[in-house]
Amino acid sequence: MQQLPPLGKLLFIYLWTNSHRELSGVYAITPKTISQETGIEEGKVTGLLSKLYPKVFYDKEKCVVFVVNMVRHQFMRGEGISPTVRLGIRRAIRNAPRAHPFIAKFCEAYPTIMVLDDYQLGEVSNGDVPPPEEAATLANGKPKDHAKNERYLQWWAAYPRKDTGPKGPYKHWPHPMPDELFETIMARLAEFVASEQWQDPEKVPMGTTWLNQRRWEGVVVKKGGGSKAANALPAKPGKYANISERVQTDG
């Protein structure tokens, strides 16, 4: 952007932020619309758009723009992208002019999001794109409905205190949920359930508290271990955890 004239910089920012843009960065917009919304003379718009190449492609005959790095800078971390956002981008391609060459350029720029074989006359192949309500269940996505999260349901079935109902604790269910973390949570829960303290229903914390405070990382009090709370996290060392350090510091 440093080499662009002031109006070129304004136009570049506008192409990222206007209300006509699509998640894919491929969308239709006329020089007249750009002129009206930016104040740039219509006769200068096309010339300025050409100065933005190769960061921006513009088809002046069909009035279609492709802001090449829009997806990369706004939605991607490395090559990773949220399954829900990926779905939205693929669906946004449907709003692009049908079979426009910029679709192929998008596929070349973002092969992890879409390949040209997925695009058929402006439609995304049904076999690879689930309906919106299922998007959150992809990969490690967290479904909005707890009843669709099988791992959460396993935890809830094993958790002994259910007076809050299953919906409340779910908002604190860790996300993402790697296999190792899930196995740890279930194994520690089994230890707590078998502990002496949890034999008293009144001493079992609510599921919301147990998840929110990550109490599976806490200390399980074994039989005969005293009255120390079985679900409490280990205390963090204080400034003077080491008594010799205190003597040296305070004299």
Image (spheres, rainbow, N blue to C red):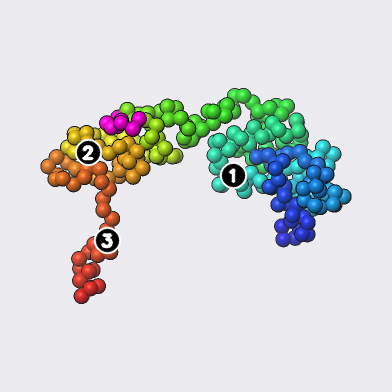
The residue lying at 58 percent from left, 45 percent from top is 76
* Amino acid type, mark 2: Lys
* Amino acid type, mark 1: Phe
Residue 79, visible in the rendered structure: yes
Specify few, some or many for label 2: CA neighbours under 10 Å numbering under 14, 14-19, or 20 or more: few
- On-image quarter of the N terminus: bottom right
The residue pinned by badge 2 equals 203
The residue lying at 75 percent from left, 30 percent from top is 98
Residue 178, visible in the rendered structure: no
- Residue sticking out furthest to the right: 43
Left or right: residue 58 versus residue 181 is right
Residue 17, placed above or below residue 158: below
Q: Are marks 3 and 1 in contact (CB under 8 Å)?
A: no
Whole-percent x and y of residue 219?
Answer: 24, 45
Comparing 178 with 37, the one in front is 37
Whole-percent x and y of residue 62?
Answer: 82, 37
SS of the residue under disc 3? loop
Specify few, some or many for label 1: CA neighbours under 10 Å numbering under 14, 14-19, or 20 or more: some
Question: How far is the residue under mark 3 from the one under mark 2?
Answer: 27 Å
On residue 238, the disc is 3
Specify few, some or many for label 3: CA neighbours under 10 Å numbering under 14, 14-19, or 20 or more: few
The residue pinned by badge 1 equals 75
- On-image quarter of the C terminus: bottom left
The question of residue 107 being in magenta is answered with: no
Comparing 229 with 74, the one in front is 229
Sequence-first disc among 3 and 2: 2
Sequence-first disc among 2 and 1: 1
Question: How far is the residue under mark 3 from the one under mark 1?
Answer: 41 Å
Q: Nearer the viewer, mark 3 or mark 2?
A: 2
